[in-house]
Image (cartoon, helix red, strand yellow):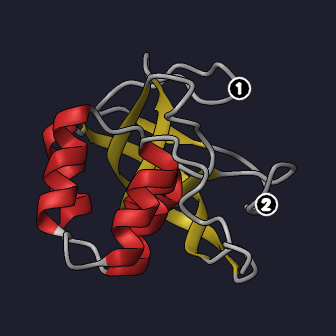
């Protein structure tokens, strides 16, 4: 399965294991998704990988990966994260550059764009790009204002 995986900037995971592009990785044992699970965690959707790495606080790398072998699928319907997997084998195909990540996000549906914007720190130029493309989408403009421009009043309920 093709998917996405997020890493620290230097291609280490949350447990400081270093990964390399093109190398095949394998885990032994029962494959189970979760913090206490076993396997290489990947997501079908790029924006879902951001759930595990805070791009507002850290420099991150997002990679296109290929995973295979035994797997466990997980959906977190409460928080709206779907198609997350733990796999027995993993290969990193490429590290996505910033332009590829932004172009990917610009072509998502409204809900997925909002999730992306709430989890991925944009530059000022990228904010302008999103605002220009989605200027007719009030929910996306508010999301940009709240998460990217730190306007915490945007969702404030006005009392009459």
Q: Which of 71 and 12 is in front in this view?
A: 12
Judged from the image, the secondary structure of the residue bearing numbered disc 2 is: loop
| Rendered position, 71 above or below 154 | below
Measuring from the top left, give residue 119's x and y in whole percent. 51, 49
Asked if residue 44 can be seen in this view, the reply is no
Q: In this view, does 110 lie to the left or right of 131?
A: right
Question: Who's the residue at 43% across and 44% down the image?
Answer: 148
Question: Who's the residue at 50% across and 49% down the image?
Answer: 147
**Residue beneath disc 1:** 15
Q: Distance between the residues labelled 2 and 1?
A: 19 Å
Residue at the limit of the structure toward the right, as seen here: 36
Measuring from the top left, give residue 48's x and y in whole percent. 51, 61
Q: In what quadrant of the picture does the C terminus appear? A: bottom right
Q: Is residue 92 left or right of residue 100?
A: right
**Residue beneath disc 2:** 30
Q: Is residue 49 left or right of residue 91?
A: right
Asked if residue 124 can be seen in this view, the reply is yes
């Amino acid at each position: 399965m093709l998917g996405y995986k997020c890493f620290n900037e230097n291609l280490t995971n949350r447990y400081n294991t270093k990964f390399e592009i093109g190398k095949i990785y394998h885990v032994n044992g029962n494959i189970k998704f979760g913090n206490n699970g076993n396997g290489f965690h990947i997501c079908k959707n790029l924006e879902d990988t951001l759930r595990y790495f805070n791009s507002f606080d850290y420099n991150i790398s997002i990679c296109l990966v290929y995973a295979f072998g035994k797997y466990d699928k997980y959906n977190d319907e409460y928080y709206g994260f779907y198609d997350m997997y733990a796999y027995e084998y993993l290969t990193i195909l490429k590290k996505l550059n910033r332009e590829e990540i932004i172009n990917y996000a610009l072509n998502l549906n409204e809900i997925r764009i909002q999730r992306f914007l709430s989890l991925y720190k944009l530059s000022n130029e990228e904010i302008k790009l999103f605002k220009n493309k989605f200027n007719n989408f009030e929910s996306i403009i508010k999301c940009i204002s709240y998460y990217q421009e730190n306007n915490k009043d945007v969702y404030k309920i006005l009392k009459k």
